[in-house]
Amino acid sequence: MSLVTFHPEQALDPFFNFDSDRFFNTKQNRWRTDAEAISPKVNVTEDENFFHLEAETPGMKDKDISIEVHNGVLTIKGHKENESDTEKEHYHIREFSSQSFERSFKLSDRVNTEKVSAKIDNGVLIVDLPKHEQIKPKKIEVQSN
């Protein structure tokens, strides 16, 4: 069993232990000022009629996201520009910057790609992937004589 010694001063954000040379050196710090590619976390669920894909897209709106289905692959792309005017601002820390992502999923042949729909609600993108009619379970009633 190994124990790790906790030093509270090491848990603070580097801004509170400000070293301007280290802070602004983009080769050494963990912050980037250009558009960082992110990969949104997703959940995929299934019910009788649909597969539902939910992706975290914080701060994005419908105009920031594009969805394409081609050759059985669902591709979700997002791009959001930072809305602040950088010429007028003097940042000490700038973690709010442009963000973009692209994520693709190989679809099952059970998905009716002609009827895929999507919406965004409170930073969550919801893609509904309907199942083909012949794939849905058919209830067969058993009759007695």
Image (spheres, rainbow, N blue to C red):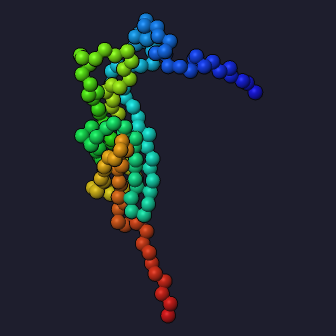
Residue 73 can be seen in this image: no
- Where 43 sits versus 4, above or below? below
Residue 58 can be seen in this image: yes
Q: Nearer the viewer, residue 61 or 34?
A: 61
Residue that appears at 38% across and 23% down: 95
Residue that appears at 32% across and 46% down: 120
**Relative side of 87 to 56, left or right:** left
What percent of the width, then of the height, locates residue 24? 40, 10
Residue that appears at 40% across and 66% down: 136
Q: Nearer the viewer, residue 85 or 60?
A: 85
- Where 125 sits versus 45, above or below? above
Residue that appears at 31% across and 38% down: 60
- Where 91 sits versus 63, above or below? above
What percent of the width, then of the height, locates residue 66? 27, 41
**Relative side of 84 to 129, left or right:** left
Q: Say which quadrant the N terminus sits in.
A: top right
What percent of the width, then of the height, locates residue 90? 31, 14
Query: Residue at the top extreme?
Result: 21
Q: Quadrant of residue 32?
A: top left
Report the number of discs: 0
Query: Residue at the bottom extreme?
Result: 145
What percent of the width, then of the height, locates residue 70? 29, 46
